[in-house]
Image (cartoon, coloured by chain):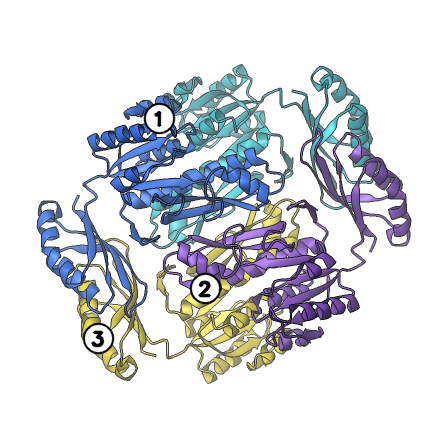
Chain colours: A cyan, B purple, C blue, D yellow
Amino acid sequence: KNKGCLLVRCPDRPGIVASISRFLFQYNANIITSNQYSTNPEGGDFFIRIEFASPSLHENRNEIKKSFEAIAENFSMDWKMTFPSEVKRTAIFVSKELHCIRELLFEWQSGDLMTEIVVVISNHQEAKELVEGFGIPFLHLPASKENRREVETQQLKWLEEYQVDLIVLARYMQILTPVFVEAHPKKIINIHHSFLPAFVGARPYDRAYQRGVKLIGATGHYVTNDLDEGPIIEQDINRVDHTDNIEDMKKIGRSIERSVLARSVKWHIEDRIIVDGNKTIVF
Amino acid sequence: KNKGCLLVRCPDRPGIVASISRFLFQYNANIITSNQYSTNPEGGDFFIRIEFASPSLHENRNEIKKSFEAIAENFSMDWKMTFPSEVKRTAIFVSKELHCIRELLFEWQSGDLMTEIVVVISNHQEAKELVEGFGIPFLHLPASKENRREVETQQLKWLEEYQVDLIVLARYMQILTPVFVEAHPKKIINIHHSFLPAFVGARPYDRAYQRGVKLIGATGHYVTNDLDEGPIIEQDINRVDHTDNIEDMKKIGRSIERSVLARSVKWHIEDRIIVDGNKTIVF
Amino acid sequence: KNKGCLLVRCPDRPGIVASISRFLFQYNANIITSNQYSTNPEGGDFFIRIEFASPSLHENRNEIKKSFEAIAENFSMDWKMTFPSEVKRTAIFVSKELHCIRELLFEWQSGDLMTEIVVVISNHQEAKELVEGFGIPFLHLPASKENRREVETQQLKWLEEYQVDLIVLARYMQILTPVFVEAHPKKIINIHHSFLPAFVGARPYDRAYQRGVKLIGATGHYVTNDLDEGPIIEQDINRVDHTDNIEDMKKIGRSIERSVLARSVKWHIEDRIIVDGNKTIVF
Amino acid sequence: KNKGCLLVRCPDRPGIVASISRFLFQYNANIITSNQYSTNPEGGDFFIRIEFASPSLHENRNEIKKSFEAIAENFSMDWKMTFPSEVKRTAIFVSKELHCIRELLFEWQSGDLMTEIVVVISNHQEAKELVEGFGIPFLHLPASKENRREVETQQLKWLEEYQVDLIVLARYMQILTPVFVEAHPKKIINIHHSFLPAFVGARPYDRAYQRGVKLIGATGHYVTNDLDEGPIIEQDINRVDHTDNIEDMKKIGRSIERSVLARSVKWHIEDRIIVDGNKTIVF
């Protein structure tokens, strides 16, 4: 199609929107949606996301990108121009629990997740039948603390072969090494089964049960080298009470996890997210 | 202060944002927040709300308003430019139940409702002490179906005397005549104690109880001449179950009513709402 | 297993719990959970649900049922004693939209829906592959207003053949005749895609969009002969705003519909629901 | 009135409900509501809360209490029988922020909080006018780390003078010493302005902002000697996004804090809470 999306981050000062909008107008582009945010109009950072459409955008897109560079330089912009017609290629990592990958596959099948799911990688066999039923390659490689290095080397090779743009950890349950994480910065989305920063690390439902909380939650976030400390994309919670044991909490948690992960992935795919240090701007 | 707010509605076509942002740039204005929406980029309606700041805005505001007219005409805009420094003058109408007016008064006292509450008008005496404790004039006039005409005549006179910009019906419980409503179009906000369009009209909690619903709600809306059919500003709900009788529902409902009304009034006061036919755009 | 569930409704008066609990104690039964509710301790109706366990319940269950009759008669009880080991047999009716049946099938596969799904009946082919992938018989019969009578006759025959205890309309989109409904009283659960009683009938999302509501919802209810007027089991909502068009609302609505329907079916299967006129008591 | 409330905790075994209900029946008591919970029907702990009414309960209440001792001993019960007619006496501690105490006072004034608020104690003067406006004694004593010991000695004396049953810390902002806490075990309710166990300790909104969370919350809990580690009574959250700065979070947080605290206090006053180690059973 003839749609584009511009994501910008730069020091705030007067004239940014005027320049961008005049630029788009010159290319006969109509602004479909536009969202902006400034940490502080005086001396802060400015962020904007613009979806636009232009009759011959598909043909001109490289030219437009090229000519935007002058504006970008003038305002010291950190920027990205993407085109929905260039669909992102997604890999899903999964272990034994299937509720998250199932949600992603069905949202994708329903047309609500505009990406290509090119490969599923797992250290277990549980997801094989489901994944192959969708006609998606399923690559299996047992992983543990011992063989982490070799496993990751193979996984990185696969990700390159499949030209992957986004990696979704759909309850993958393995910790990634810095080598892996740095190979795909701001490109790995994880679902953590607690309301971060509560219950960082392992067995969050057990600990939530021990603490006697009245709400449990889930967090979708980008993976960094600090465990469960990456920029949060989305969170949600559900109510529990004294009658819910750990198993009940896990069951209730599964429905939060899958919807939080699906929203996080959707927003990334639609280029709605700008990572700002350890936070996210979600437009 | 040197802040302004521009609200625009016009037929969508390329160049609107470019024109507005160039205009603001010429006046040395920095855009603080900007939200826009288009019903359809091709042939639809375009809406935008821009908060901006400019060093000498306070002195130049009439000039800026004047010079915006050229752009407005060019794009056939329906528009409004307001200045937070020109505080809106609000009247509250109330009957016997005080939870909604109490919430408004405390939000106002905490500085979360940037308006001047210039007068409270009631057909009962219940609110008198509370209102006068805040140093606000309390005008009392018994109202009923019989004397509606004379009562409204007096009320309209009062509203004029107090130069009222906004009328909030904080559980006023009297139906207004078309004469009254038309004297203050899009300026009267009501809280209806149900999730509209469910339970239009009288005694919604009784009917919710009879119907056996599992959620009850409240709706903040502009008043038009069709009872409970005006543009909805905000709605919210709370969970109920079989153990809740009508009194319990009213109690639960009160906390929804007061927060929904407070949000509705706040958004109006901050010029966040554009009425679009029977709907609202809330930026 | 050795578990049982007792559901009782009778006029409230002192001694009911004492009698029931003494009865269970005599059979060496431990009460696992017990919930009760009285519309009015003086002259109202009393409802109780007790889950209990007893070492040799499986062998004695007919005897226990038999001997409870004396108590039931004494207190004029309307009662039911069920045993989780006697799994309910469920039929799902579906049309073209698959999100609801998919949710049910996956909850069932995950062990969160303790029923046997014995057959799926549809007037379209869309669900065939999905259903048969789960090894469940899929029966297809085109239905329309014209052939409703013959279609229902065949469907009723099938329901008898498969000895169905519960019929779930997972977005079936056809109106059932009184003949069909009366053949399975309080045994048909429907998901209506609005927050009842708002938007009874067809095209609720279109009408929600036209009305400009800020929340959309879904309702799980038992089917009676008054369209969308049956006892409500569960409702939930989600927030929408002016940017959501009808398609967006449908998408947002789908996730509410499927969770509301799944909860409604789960509660029925676990014998948590007592229908009280046009309302439900959900324990 | 002739109402009573029985709270019981004991090792689970068959016959508990039978014994209690027979006992109540003998005293001609009708069970109004009854809730029970077992951590494990085999070898776990059993909890029950029963509200009952009996024609001459007011006169017989000491006799009933006395004669229940035999049952209690038989089942090794930890129990309490209370009578709503014996209203609890509550003290509120407050510092400078008034939103929580205001909510409590208005819920109390509306008849939704069935307690006597006998005194308000503060280390600041901000609440004085509000509190005295309700005709409640306001006692002021500046408190800081330095004079904590003397201040608490005076406060404990006041609590004894006013015969206080419950102490509510409505954003009191001072840490209590073990001496104070142990003088009123399970009788001090605090509102913490975060979703515990996230952001234990000081300045939770600042830290929530730094972490970039998408939801903020509040927690009502009993005070123990471990800071913010006491049994949680109630929690709730609200959504925030990147546009909310610390001040916005505090504002949004205030409305959660006040409703969570009000619910926590209400449940305590209605004897709905059983503390079980570091958790609460809320019936």
The mark closer to the camera, 1 or 3, is 3
Within 10 Å of disc 3 (Cα), the crowding (few <14, some 14-19, many 20+) is: some
Q: Which residue is mark 1?
A: A126
Instruction: Return the mark for residue A219.
Output: none
Q: Residue D198: image x %, image y %? A: 51, 51
| Residue under the point 74% across and 17% down | A60
Q: Residue at x 39, y 33 (%)?
A: C174
Q: Which residue is mark 3?
A: D28
Q: Indicate the secondary structure of the residue bearing disc 1.
A: loop
Q: Nearer the viewer, residue A225 or B265?
A: B265
Badge 2 element: helix
| Quarter in which the N terminus of chain B is drawn | bottom right
**Element at label 3:** loop
Q: Is residue D224 visible?
A: no
In 3D space, how far apart are the residues under numbered discs 2 and 3 (Cα atoms)?
Answer: 32 Å
Q: Nearer the viewer, mark 2 or mark 3?
A: 3
How far from the left and from the top, in percent, is residue A206?
A: 38, 46
Using the rendered image, report if marks 1 and 2 lie on a common chain.
no
Q: State which quadrant residue D229 falls in.
A: bottom left
Q: Amino acid at mark 1?
A: Glu
Residue D268 placement, left or right of A54: left
Q: Which residue is mark 2?
A: D264
Crowd band around label 1 with a 10 angstrom C-alpha radius: few (<14), some (14–19), many (20+):
some
Q: Name the kind of residue labelled 3 in the image.
A: Asn
Mark 1 — on which chain does it sit?
A
Q: Earlier in the sequence, mark 2 or mark 3?
A: 3
